[in-house]
């Protein structure tokens, strides 16, 4: 959901980018070159969702707002003076969804994001930011936002530029009826997907006061909530497990499920609002 080509600062051409992801078994991607609109591409077995990445930097206060516009219907001209809320408003007006990219890499405070209206999602993992800056994980950042009532969907992405160690490491698995851009994006808006580096969620269900997660074989299943201390938050065993249960606490308002496989690779659900 976040890639770059030679149209901005990526190492691959559009054709090379599409070919690389197709060969890896992907069904879709979104090309989001910096301030360069890509209008999309559709075939029977592969979709490129229209997109652009916008940015606004405040070098004095050391913060960078990078916002991807996903499935926008037209080019949106911006420059260095265009501030984040203005950019988000333009994305929504153009029929797209706005995603806050790599907030940990960007050194954003929580207020920086919470003061913005119209975001659909936040990147929980960004491969480029982790591979080259060691600031690719924004899970704790998103959890603090959610604990204050600012609950957004979560995306794992590549942000591929060089296509070496910054590609094919973060993606989403989407539940939708049709392989087209609108169907995929509608599922993202509704939270009908999960983010992963490889491990799989088979099913997450809520029955009464219990959340059950069924997964591929993993080393641990964590139920991350906005309650400070939960002794049984992490479900582990001597070997690999494929199911974990969590009893919802009276103090929980949101819970997300995070799984970790034997190689340390993770997958993340969206927030369950209780």
Image (spheres, rainbow, N blue to C red):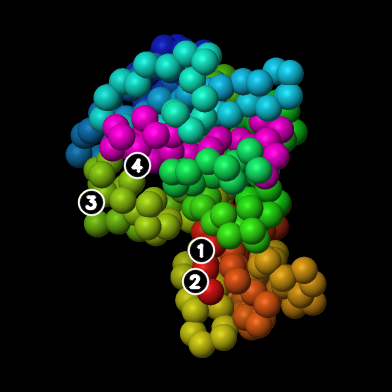
Q: Quadrant of the N terminus?
A: top left
Give the CA separation, mark 1 to mark 2.
Answer: 7 Å
Picture layout, residue 260 above or below residue 72:
below
Q: Secondary structure at mark 4?
A: loop
- Using the image, tell me which numbered label, if any, was put on residue 201: 1
- The x and y percentages for residue 241 are 64, 72
- Are the two marked residues, 1 and 2, in contact with CB atoms closer than 8 angstroms? yes
Sort mark 2 into few (<14), some (14-19) or many (20+) by Cα contacts within 10 Å: some
Sort mark 3 into few (<14), some (14-19) or many (20+) by Cα contacts within 10 Å: few
- The residue identified by callout 2 is 204
- Are the two marked residues, 4 and 2, in contact with CB atoms closer than 8 angstroms? no
- The x and y percentages for residue 48 are 32, 32
The mark that comes first in sequence, 1 or 3, is 3
Q: Secondary structure at mark 3?
A: loop
Give the CA separation, mark 1 to mark 4.
Answer: 18 Å
> What range is drawn magenta here?
88-110
Picture layout, residue 145 above or below residue 33:
below
Give the CA separation, mark 4 to mark 2.
Answer: 23 Å
- The x and y percentages for residue 41 are 25, 28
Point 66% across, 43% down: residue: 111
Point 66% across, 30% down: residue: 106
Residue found at the very far left of the displayed protein? 44
Based on the picture, tell me whether residue 90 belongs to the magenta stretch: yes
Based on the picture, tell me whether residue 236 belongs to the magenta stretch: no
- The residue identified by callout 4 is 27
Sort mark 1 into few (<14), some (14-19) or many (20+) by Cα contacts within 10 Å: many
Q: Secondary structure at mark 1?
A: strand
């Amino acid at each position: 959901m976040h890639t770059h080509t030679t149209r901005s600062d990526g190492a691959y051409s559009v054709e090379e980018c599409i070919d690389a992801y197709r060969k890896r078994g992907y069904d879709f991607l979104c090309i989001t070159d910096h301030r360069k609109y890509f209008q999309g591409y559709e075939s029977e077995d592969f979709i490129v969702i229209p997109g652009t990445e916008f940015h606004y930097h405040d070098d004095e206060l050391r913060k960078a707002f990078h916002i991807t516009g996903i499935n926008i219907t037209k080019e949106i001209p911006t420059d260095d003076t265009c501030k984040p809320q203005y950019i988000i408003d333009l994305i929504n007006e153009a029929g797209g969804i706005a995603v806050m990219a790599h907030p940990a890499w960007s050194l954003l405070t929580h207020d920086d994001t919470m003061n913005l209206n119209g975001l659909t999602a936040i990147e929980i993992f960004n491969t480029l930011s982790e591979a080259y800056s060691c600031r690719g994980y924004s899970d704790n950042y998103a959890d603090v936002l959610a604990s204050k009532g600012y609950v957004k969907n979560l995306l794992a992405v590549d942000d591929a530029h060089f296509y070496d160690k910054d590609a094919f490491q973060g993606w989403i698995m989407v539940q939708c009826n049709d392989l087209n851009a609108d169907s995929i994006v509608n599922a993202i808006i509704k939270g009908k997907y999960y983010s992963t580096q490889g491990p799989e969620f088979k099913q997450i269900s809520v029955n009464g006061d219990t959340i059950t997660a069924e997964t591929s074989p993993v080393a641990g299943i964590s139920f991350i909530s906005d309650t400070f201390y939960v002794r049984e938050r992490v479900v582990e065993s001597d070997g690999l497990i494929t199911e974990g249960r969590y009893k919802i606490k009276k103090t929980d308002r949101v819970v997300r499920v995070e799984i970790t496989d034997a190689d340390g690779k993770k997958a993340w659900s969206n927030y369950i609002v209780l």
